[in-house]
Image (cartoon, rainbow, N blue to C red):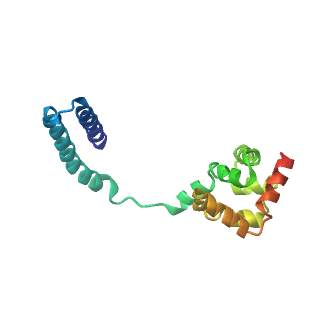
Amino acid sequence: MIMQVAFRVIGNDATITRAAEGELDLNVWESIILESLSESIRLMRRAIPRFVLSCVIGITVNAGVGHRNASSSLALSTALAEIFGYPAASRVAKHASSSGISISRAAVECGLLDEESADRMFEDVSAFANAEKQKTLFIASGTPALSDLNQETTQRA
C-alpha cells in the first residue's frame, strides 16, 4: 500500500510541477495544483499512520548482526584508501574478499597495520564515515606519520 501511495504522490508532484511551469498565469492551473496537492496530503495522512502501526512499531535492532555486517564490509577498504592510497586499499580488499576475512585482518596480513593498530582503528566502524575522524584515529593509534606510510605503501605496490 505504501508504494502505491508513493507512486501517486510522485505523479501528483509531477502534475503540480508541470502545471506551475506551464503558463505565466497560474489561475488557469490553480484547480489541478490544489486537487493534486490535496490528494497527496490526504493519501499520506491515511497511509503513514497505517504503515507505522503495521510495519514500523515493534522493529528492533539486532546490534550484534549490524556490527558484524559493518565490520566485515569490504566498503571499509575505501576508507583505507584515504590513508594508504588506492593501490594498497585495493590489495587489502582483494585479499579480504578472496580469503573470506575482515578488512581489519586483511590489513594486518598485507602488512599495512600491526594487529593492535588494526583493532583500534576498526573497533568503531562508524569512524569511517568521517575522513577527518579516520586520520585522527589512525594517528592516535601510534602508527607512523601518514606521509611515511604513503611512501612505504607506494614502494610496496
Quarter of the picture holding the C terminus: top right
In the image, residue 124 sits, relative to residue 7, either above or below, namely: below
In the image, residue 152 sits, relative to residue 33, either above or below, namely: below
Furthest residue toward front:
24
User: Viewer-proximal residue, 117 or 144?
Assistant: 144
Q: Quadrant of residue 137?
A: bottom right
Q: Position of residue 19 (x, y in %)?
A: 22, 32
| Residue at x 27% of width, y 56% of height | 53
User: Viewer-proximal residue, 15 or 143?
Assistant: 15
Q: Is residue 119 left or right of residue 131?
A: right
Q: Is residue 58 left or right of residue 68?
A: left
Q: Quadrant of residue 143?
A: bottom right
Furthest residue toward top:
22
In the image, residue 40 sits, relative to residue 104, either above or below, namely: above
Q: Position of residue 144 (x, y in %)?
A: 80, 64
Quarter of the picture holding the N terminus: top left
Q: Does residue 102 appear anywhere in the picture?
A: no
User: Viewer-proximal residue, 14 or 63?
Assistant: 14
Q: Position of residue 35 (x, y in %)?
A: 15, 38
Q: How many marks?
A: 0
In the image, residue 88 sits, relative to residue 27, either above or below, namely: below
Q: Does residue 111 appear anywhere in the picture?
A: yes
| Residue at x 63% of width, y 53% of height | 72
Q: Position of residue 17 (x, y in %)?
A: 27, 36
| Residue at x 53% of width, y 57% of height | 66
